[in-house]
Image: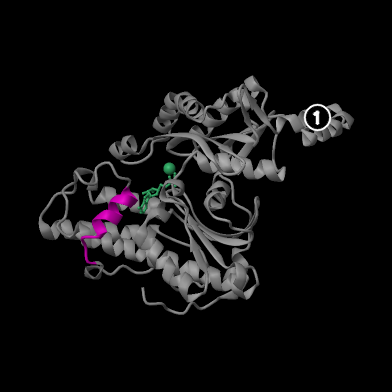
Amino acid sequence: MLTLNKTLGVLCRLPKWQIRGFLRSFTFRPGKQFLHKLVLGIETSCDDTAAAVMDETGNILGEAIHSQTEVHLKTGGIIPSVAQQLHRENIEKIVKKTLCASGVTPNELSAIATTVKPGLALSLGVGLEYSLQLVNQYKKPFIPVHHMEAHALTIRITNKVDFPFLVLLVSGGHCLLAIVQGISDFLLLGKSLDIAPGDMLDKVARRLSLIKHPAYSTMSGGKAIEHLAKQGNRLHFDFQHPLHYCRNCDFSFSGLQTAVDKIITQKEKEEGIEEGQILSCAADIAAAVQHTVASHIAKRTHRAILFCQQRGFLTPSNAILVVSGGVASNLYIRRTLEIVTRATNCVLLCPPVKLCTDNGIMIAWNGIERLRAGLGILDNTEGIRYEPKCPLGVDISKQVGEASIKVPSLKI
Ligand code: ADP
Ligand code: MG
């Protein structure tokens, strides 16, 4: 009571706008009081319509997701207009389901955070338009979110990770290594020069016709390859490791994809089967591809760790590598990275699998992080646009290349 009286005393002496700001930081419900700020996060950057409500301590009060994976598997890849239509059909349902599960009304939210970059233009547009409607209707602050920043910060929901740390983001649309110095303060060490590893694994799975195999027909390509690889022998095929002559932290996967395509065509001829049927050596190919992808990612990450240690970006007491994105749910890749972190005295941290792929929780959390830091919270959304392409942080990949660090070989 004494504390309440004191608070009221202080409040009376504040100007009106500050009182309003203070009150907005609390959420009241009849019979129940939210002591923490609440953020609704909305994600539609690619092929998942997702939302979540979180409080500032990291509690997930409600969440919902609609995945388009099965539809896109049938059409042989993401068709942007189909993704847009599916987002349109599902966004309201998903947000309502999330709010309902959380027991929070839109009025009780402290802010709405939405992915606005990077991603598919048609997909981003649906999330942004819907969010702005809510923002205007309920007069809430808006927090535009960078999809990759959200992936990078997700680990801070489950683990106490201080800045700076190293992050590897590997998904269907992205592949990069960056130093996270602060919530929106990134140094980019390297990225894919062509396609992302998830995209490549999706293409290989499609070329191997895994959709026709009952066990894999509903899995994403990457997940199907991981499962199939368990029955294969990687030593039956030998693919060249991409960019092995470039001492930088960039990635490349399209050359490997072409090489795999060639092998599949050759094997189809040898086995006398038509394109569309499953090869008897499909598991061996899956195992060899997965191994080459894992080794390539591990090599670039190893170099990034050595660069960071040389330049003092990672201190011995805080040498953390965070790995996230859909491809980070691959256990073979995680174990390969563990070999690297063990050899370099780093700690490897991965968010739970559910938080590695696109989700609404990471967007809500990005909103919480920004709200707590007072970063990028908009009361006026005029002129806000989505950006299909948007680099992450300051690009220092040239410096990494100039350092030309030779990576010692590790037994993987
Ligand atoms: P994006 O929306 O940018 O594709 P996501 O984070 O949703 O990113 O990741 C989806 C990608 O992750 C797909 O390309 C999928 O094949 C890949 N993926 C999912 N699970 C696995 C896995 N176990 N192993 C490898 N790749 C995976
Ligand atoms: Mg996705």
Instruction: For the C terminus, give its image quadrant.
Output: bottom left
Say whether residue 345 is magenta. no
The residue lying at 66 percent from left, 43 percent from top is 370
Depth check: give the residue in front, 247 or 411.
411
In the displayed structure image, the side of residue 43 where residue 33 appears, left or right: right
Q: Which residues are magenta?
A: 221-233
Against 162, residue 248 (above or below) is below
Residue 226 included in the magenta stretch of the image: yes
Q: Is the N terminus in the top left, top right, bottom left or bottom right quadrant?
A: top right
Q: Amino acid at mark 1?
A: Ile
Residue for badge 1: 19
Name the quadrant containing residue 211. Answer: top left
* Left or right: 85 in relation to 135: left
Q: Position of residue 348 (x, y in %)?
A: 49, 64
* Disc 1 secondary structure class: helix
**Viewer-side residue, 141 vs 22:** 22
